[in-house]
Image: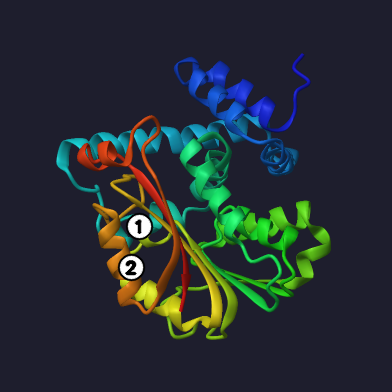
């Protein structure tokens, strides 16, 4: 009987279920630092406590399979399959059963996909842990950025805003399980970020990870984000280039396109990171239209 727990158990389960994928995730597991493994174990043990290891493996496979299908379409057609939010809203964001698997699977990729690990490291390395005030995250999803901020920062108030009730429920559940002593400092809001009814308060740290590629109006989202950032705020934004997925509707073809939107929206870029497709250089990834992950530290 297998007595392994956490990430080790999940890697073993996926390796058994998907032998062709085993070497990739085993190599990725070795890529992690001890602290990252500990964080992964805490998150995965929390998810498995009320569900099962099989649910985690199936959730990861959902991301894997849906991404492969989207990549084949992109390679064949040169575009994303969908271009409007309404085309994916009901099947993804407002489908609670699918959204749970999607968000859990996406969280697992933060530990098992080297490109996501590097983005998470950049977030951790650039975060202003001594900054005081409030934190806003638009689209907290699985809650990993939020948990990191709550775990180590001096911020006193945290706000998570998401259009998906399932995403907010997962975020709430993760904070209650992993950082129960901090839950009273967290306020979760289900809303359309562009809607007038959304909260208009300003914040000292503002985060929006992997949102721009999911929306029809990325510039409007960035402009709105700028309006929510206090003077001197630390702003962290990520997105992806040539990275098809089931719910990606805005296609960025290069870094210049993303950076033009950022500066046109009133931000200055302080630091940036571009992570090419695993095993390729940035130049090779751009030439072959392979996925690139990008992250930016901004000031308003």
* Quarter of the image where one finds residue 85: bottom left
Element type at mark 2: helix
Q: Mark 1 touching mark 2, by CB under 8 A?
A: yes
Residue 84 shows in the view: no
Q: Residues within 10 Å of mark 1 (few under 14, many from 20)?
A: many
Viewer-proximal residue, 254 or 99? 254
Q: Which residue is mark 1?
A: 213
- Left/right placement of residue 219 relative to residue 271 reads left
Image point 33% across, 45% down: which residue?
243
The mark nearer the N terminus, 1 or 2, is 1
Q: Which residue is mark 2?
A: 218
Element type at mark 1: helix
- Left/right placement of residue 163 relative to residue 50 reads left
Residue at the left extreme of this rendering: 77
- Left/right placement of residue 100 relative to residue 280 reads right
Image point 54% across, 52% down: which residue?
122
Residue 296 point in image, percent of width and height: 44, 61
Q: Residues within 10 Å of mark 2 (few under 14, many from 20)?
A: some
């Amino acid at each position: 009987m297998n007595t392994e727990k956490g990430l080790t158990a999940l890697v073993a389960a996926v390796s058994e279920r998907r032998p062709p994928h085993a070497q990739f995730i085993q190599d990725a597991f070795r890529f992690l630092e001890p602290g990252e493994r500990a964080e992964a174990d805490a998150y995965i043990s929390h998810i498995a406590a009320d569900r099962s290891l099989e649910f985690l493996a199936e959730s990861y496979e959902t991301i894997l399979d849906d991404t492969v299908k989207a990549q084949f379409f992109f390679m064949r057609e040169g575009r994303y399959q969908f271009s409007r939010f309404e085309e994916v809203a009901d099947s993804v964001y407002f489908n609670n059963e699918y959204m749970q698997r999607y968000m859990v699977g996406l969280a697992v990729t933060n530990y098992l996909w080297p490109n996501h690990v590097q983005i998470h490291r950049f977030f951790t390395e650039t975060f202003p842990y001594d900054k005081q005030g409030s934190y806003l995250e638009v689209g907290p999803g699985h809650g990993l950025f939020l948990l990191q901020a709550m775990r180590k920062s001096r911020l006193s108030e945290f706000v998570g805003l998401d259009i998906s009730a399932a995403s907010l429920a997962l975020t709430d559940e993760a904070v209650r399980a992993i950082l129960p002593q901090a839950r009273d400092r967290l306020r979760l809001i289900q809303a359309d970020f562009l809607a007038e009814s959304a909260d208009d308060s300003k914040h000292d740290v503002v985060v929006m990870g992997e949102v721009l590629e999911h929306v029809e109006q990325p510039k409007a989202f960035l402009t709105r984000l700028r309006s929510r950032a206090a003077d001197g705020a630390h702003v962290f934004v990520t997105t992806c280039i040539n990275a098809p997925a089931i719910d990606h509707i805005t296609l960025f073809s290069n870094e210049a396109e993303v950076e033009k939107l950022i500066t046109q929206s009133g931000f200055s870029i302080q630091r940036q990171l571009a992570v090419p497709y695993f095993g390729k250089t940035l130049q090779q990834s751009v030439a072959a239209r392979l996925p690139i992950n990008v992250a930016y530290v901004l000031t308003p």
